[in-house]
Image: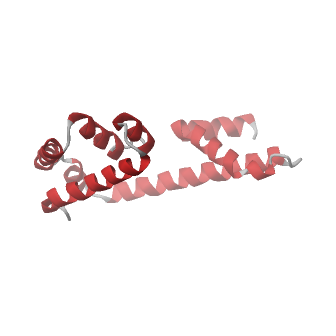
Amino acid sequence: MGTMRQSKLQTSLGDDWEDVVQEANLRCLRYQHNQEYERILTTVIRNVALDVLVKRKQDRKMYDQISAEDRQEAYTPNFGLIEDVRRVLRKHWNQKERDAIFLYFTGQASLRDIQKDLGKSTTDTHRFMGASIVTLKEELEDYAP
């Protein structure tokens, strides 16, 4: 891809640039031995980048359509819910298990990480996380939409 166009795309995408290039590389793996690989990769990078930019624009439009009052309401934390979640976590699990549940549900740890931290088998880890979901749903059902 031309340096100028690449630079503009890279600037427009910011932090997403590496993800775009990685996604394009994955999509082009089957063409890596093709004489036209560089051209194909350049085209795919451009297309993936454009997809990301279009998605951003759509998200921005949708965000702009939401009134300021609705946005404020959406981002106002429900402290009652937060306290109830803490209460349920303390009631049912020890600190290590609470940490594991928190890290997993906030996307900061994978099931494999949780398995290692808790010293459980894969099956036991899956059961533990499944049971934690059930318990949290049951205990917090008053907050369900």
Q: Position of residue 114 (x, y in %)?
A: 38, 40
Residue 35 lies, in percent from the top left, at 89, 47
Q: Across the whole image, how many numbered discs are drawn on residues?
A: 0
Q: Can the viewer see residue 51 in this picture?
A: yes
Percent across and percent down for residue 69 are 20, 54
Outermost residue, right direction?
Answer: 35
Asked if residue 140 shows in the view, the reply is no
124 relative to 51 in the view: left or right = left
Q: Residue at x 36, y 55 (%)?
A: 63
- What residue lies at 69% left-to-right and 40% top-to-bottom? 5
Taking depth in this image into account, of 138 and 28 the one nearest to the observer is 138
Q: Which of the two residues, 90 or 36, is positioned nearer the viewer here?
A: 90
Q: Is residue 42 above or below residue 11?
A: below
Near-viewer residue (36 or 34): 34
Which residue is painted at 20% across and 38% down in the image? 94
Image quadrant holding the C terminus, namely bottom left
The x, y position of residue 74, in whole percent, is 23, 53
At a point 66% along the width and 53% down the height, the residue shown is 47
Q: Residue furthest bottom?
A: 145
